[in-house]
Image (cartoon, coloured by chain):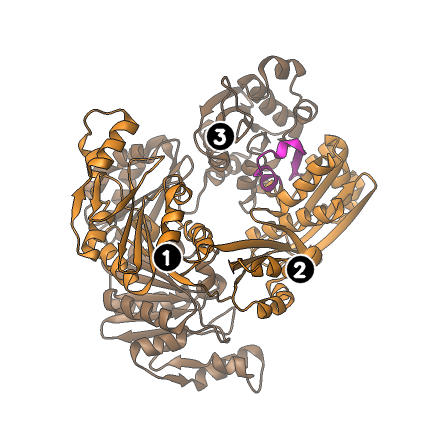
Chain colours: A orange, B brown
Amino acid sequence: MAITGRGNAEIVCTGSELLSGRLNLYVPLFHERLAPLGFRITREQSSGDTLDGIRDALSSAMKRADLVLACGGLGPTFDDLTRQAAAAALGRRLVYSKGCERILSYNYGLKKLPPNFRNQCLLVEGAKPLENTAGTAFGQVLTRGRRMLVLLPGPRREWEPMFPNFLDEEIASFFRFRPARLVKLHAAGLWETQAEKLLRPVMARFPGLDFTILAGPGTVDFHVSGDDSGGDVSRAEKACRKALGSALYGSGEETPASAAGGLLLAAGRTLACAESCTGGLASKLITDIPGSSAWFLGGCVAYSNKAKTELLGVKRSTLSRHGAVSSECAAEMAAGARRRFGADYAFSVTGIAGPDGGSPGKPVGLVHFGLAWPRGCRTFRKQYRGDRGVIRAFSANFILDELRKIIK
Amino acid sequence: MAITGRGNAEIVCTGSELLSGRLNLYVPLFHERLAPLGFRITREQSSGDTLDGIRDALSSAMKRADLVLACGGLGPTFDDLTRQAAAAALGRRLVYSKGCERILSYNYGLKKLPPNFRNQCLLVEGAKPLENTAGTAFGQVLTRGRRMLVLLPGPRREWEPMFPNFLDEEIASFFRFRPARLVKLHAAGLWETQAEKLLRPVMARFPGLDFTILAGPGTVDFHVSGDDSGGDVSRAEKACRKALGSALYGSGEETPASAAGGLLLAAGRTLACAESCTGGLASKLITDIPGSSAWFLGGCVAYSNKAKTELLGVKRSTLSRHGAVSSECAAEMAAGARRRFGADYAFSVTGIAGPDGGSPGKPVGLVHFGLAWPRGCRTFRKQYRGDRGVIRAFSANFILDELRKIIK
């Protein structure tokens, strides 16, 4: 989905590792930082650690964008070249900052700075330094005409605090955009195209806002952002919530697991689970949530048939008659996990994640689920397409979302 | 780590979603495709779905790199603009290909192509089409002088088969580089700086090869690539293996879990586990591996104390005297999992993943581990720094690697 915004921002990431095996995890994080400031990101570049490459990336970005964020290459070693590249791109010198020296001396309790610390005191002429609460590299805010270039250190724990500490205000006051609002809504149990169809009328009603649809495994995330001074974002959010109906499971940083967990916590109820083909993934998604121990008692990864019978109490006759991948087995697994852990709710997953193990009657991607709760139980059957990872991810999100609906 | 290579490649990814919330997962995959062909990636750009943006990204990349791969934007809808952008960047026309029409007609059993299929038959003048085994968008190979531009469809399942089917040969024959070899070695239980120190002499001995070091949670990956016609890559690999010693757990696509699993499979032994703070993550990493059911019987996510005593047989007195986060509890959890699942080997993890739950005596990041096997048992204690996700990931990799060493 295309998005529109009021300011254009470009990201320049530096580091040869980003071009030889390391995932770039930062662009979505910068999106979340910049959207509320009224910017859309129009381009991202990753450059290796060469002076020419970084300078060229910065120069070209500065020609196009209002705001350029450069991340990485501010360390004290030979392959940290972003300072020099920025100076070259702007045609400015590097100057030694006594103020930075005082801050580092104070923070690290040093009377005299060693050479690698002194390197960190070099600023591009005219830069405002941004203090680093987790390292020695200062961020740098540079302006030229109506454009801004911000240099940020590479590690997330170093650059992330710079936004609330100082940078958000710096950007807001320089560009004087109205503060914008980013709302993230999350739905499950429908396809991206279905979500788009439900949301299209809302998007048409609010042409001044930015919309993004992102499909995940069994989930659809929907971002709305823009100027909320007239209440447009709030109205659009309300309309989206209505359009998505019961498919909407949460907003902000919520996940299918945290949405179900929030309901359990509020109700004072507990959860257990029994996993076969997801093999611990559902438990992992649950225990990703800080504080989940308040409502999650535990789970069984019952990969072998013996574990299914002995730990979960699945009947041998069920396995011999219907097989481990059956609604009968799923129902007994869920009931067994509920009993075994003494939980109010329990779910189960048993299926064929592949690539092997499929048969004409039970192909790869066939997954059975069980849900057991104080006053009932239910089973589900799904046939997924995709590789092992896809089947497992869809399965875990599916049952966590069905759990949410049952608790509700 | 900087790398050197013989050809320079740039990647251009298109899609506004890459700039508004979606991770770009493809750059490491392209690295793995291009390194064996003798290319290093020198820059990656992600552009939104605008004709100007994509054209500009392609034009600038074509000025710098020998080979440009553009990925995405080849669909039949209005925001699929890469074809037009490539034509504009090269100053060429789009031409309708009767050959592509025949292939689509045949593949989809259609006498007359609907309009969106006809769009897919538009090639940039002079392009060689690459057949798509999973969709309607053709890849396109374009050359200008000594440079090559390749247009690839966005979905991985569509572009990935194009390399072995045709594209690898096309690139190799155009550039006539010697085929290169990419070796990936994986180590655990040491820091990136330690690995670098061990490997520095090897890197110095083979200045003609490319080396990359990538740090993961408790792991270090090491890539060696280059011309192996004289046996240099093989010799460097051997030297790296020797330098890394027992820290080396595998190569290629191996993970700590698959390395341990390979040894179990070869020995005809089985595994179970008991997880508290990792909450299913270790089981998930194990069951990510196709065929793991041959040696993994299952696991217990024993989040509550009751689960630890009732499912794993941890003594109440152990919990009251030493607490759940203790070597005593870890030892009983491992022994209990081994007994409960009837496994040859079992491991356990119990710790404080945070952000809450820490105390002066047992701070966040403290993790105890247990290992039980036919002729012994062992416990480990680690103090990690970082957030919940980091502590969990380090913990899981640590114990899976200790398991490997014990089996060995």
Query: Given the image, what chain letter belongs to the residue carrying mark 1?
Result: A
Task: Decide which of tag 1 and tag 2 comes sooner along the chain.
Answer: 1
Query: Given the image, what chain letter belongs to the residue carrying mark 2?
Result: A
User: Which is more toward the observer, B178 or B137?
Assistant: B137
- Circle 2: residue type: Leu
Q: Is residue A138 above or below residue A233?
A: above
Q: Residues within 10 Å of mark 3 (few under 14, many from 20)?
A: many
Report which quarter residue A123 is drawn in.
top left
User: Which is more toward the observer, B225 or A43?
Assistant: A43
The image's mark for residue B399 is 3
Front position among marks 1 and 2: 1
Query: Given the image, what chain letter belongs to the residue carrying mark 3?
Result: B
User: Residue A379 magenta-drawn?
Assistant: no
The image's mark for residue A406 is none
Q: Estimate the x, y position of residue B197 in percent, counting from the top left.
A: 26, 33
How many dots with numbers? 3
Q: Residues within 10 Å of mark 2 (few under 14, many from 20)?
A: many
- In the rendered image, which residue does mark 2 sit on? A244
Front position among marks 3 and 1: 1
The image's mark for residue A175 is 1
Callout 1 secondary element:
helix
Task: Give the residue drawn at x 49%, y 40%.
Answer: B258
Task: Give the residue drawn at x 52%, y 31%.
Answer: B355
